[in-house]
Amino acid sequence: MSTRYSRQELFTPIGAEGQKKIRQAKIFILGAGALGSSAGEMLVRAGVGQVTIVDRDIIEWTNLHRQQLYTEQDVVDQLPKAVAAKQRLAAINSDVEVKGQVVDVTPDNVLNMIEGYDVILDATDNMETRLIVNDAALKLNIPFFMGACVGSYGLTFPIGIEKNQPCLHCLLEMMPLQTMTCDTVGVISPIVVTTAARQVADVLKYITGNPLTPALVSADVWSGDRASIDVRSLKKELCPSCSASAVYPFLTAKHSMQTAVLCGRDTVQLSWPKSRPFELAAVAVSLRGTVSKMVYNPHLLACEYGNHRLVLFRDGRMLVHGTKDIVVAKKIAAELLG
Ligand SMILES: [Zn+2]
């Protein structure tokens, strides 16, 4: 075991001292999909001290071509991604303390979730969540390593590295990818691995004290195009998220049911406010005569209802598959849960 990291330590910018710093690092991975799988595996193999990986979704057949931690059996078992990812990552390296959390990151819970971590790695699939975490990371002074990809194109941008650099909110209007989703243009695994590799390289540079530039780097693995843009001049002096008078607008919670149309799937997510929780065991009993193909385990309840597949999670969320229409999803929720 003492030689486990020897090849990494032989790499001069890391060395034995760098390896000690890697060992002490606590990493929060936002999302256990494609980027989270790839980056999580690299960081755990590198020997970081602690990894927490969070995700709100379960594993599906359409994930397997690019989400490298998962197997066909995970799909059959309908495991939440954070549960399967935790099991796999812990098996890869028992030196690392790995936690998996099946939860949706919201303005209500984000600060508690990320507090105490050295680094946040972005592996989410939507800008809404990124902006919440951008605000929370800036508020708590934790570097946030953004990454995103669709099709054969991906980009990375480390936030909170330098005092006078822009944040995601500053750059929002110039961010590409916003009008494209995995739903419309698909995604291939080489850009996932390339994007995650760049994020992890930046994380390793940061935690080992090597120089790191807050550049917006984009790459297209199909065309071979690459660009690195110095965006420091684009910081907005009055940015509500990163200026001296920041108010962190994306941390403002609404106390009603939250809805989201999920990227890459014909799916709507409904999240109940904490003031109106539901108990899965009781729901399983009440739905027994109404729905079909019910699967109930400690993490979730899945079933079919009409043309829709539904998945209810213990933390108060329901995924309604087979629609992008929030009204249709809410109607189903009202019909089944009142
Ligand atoms: Zn900003």
Image (cartoon, rainbow, N blue to C red):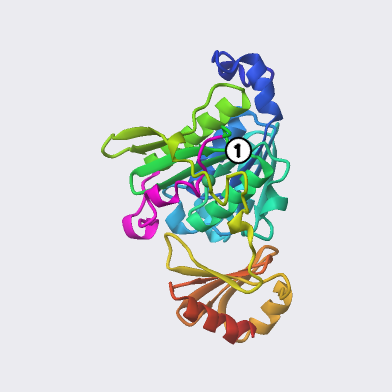
Q: Is residue 300 left or right of residue 168?
A: right
In the current view of this chain or complex, which residue is farthest to the left? 223
User: Would you identify the image quadrant in which residue 211 lies?
Assistant: top right
Could you say where residue 127 lies in the image, as x and y percent from the top left?
A: 48, 55
On screen, 77 above or below 254?
A: above
Could you say where residue 134 lies in the image, as x and y percent from the top left?
A: 57, 48
Q: Secondary structure at mark 1?
A: loop
Q: Is residue 85 left or right of residue 99?
A: left
The main secondary structure of the magenta stretch is loop
Q: Residue at x 65, y 15 (%)?
A: 16
Q: Is residue 70 left or right of residue 229?
A: right
- The answer to whether residue 224 is seen in the rendering is yes
Q: Amino acid at mark 1?
A: Pro
- The answer to whether residue 105 is seen in the rendering is no
**Neighbour tally class for label 1: few under 14, some 14-19, many 20 plus, Cα within 10 Å:** many
On screen, 115 above or below 331?
A: above
Highlighted magenta segment, given as a residue range: 164-189
Some atom of ligand 1 lies within 8 Å of the CB belonging to the residue at label 1: no
Q: The N terminus appears in which quarter of the rendering?
A: top right
Number of marks in picture: 1
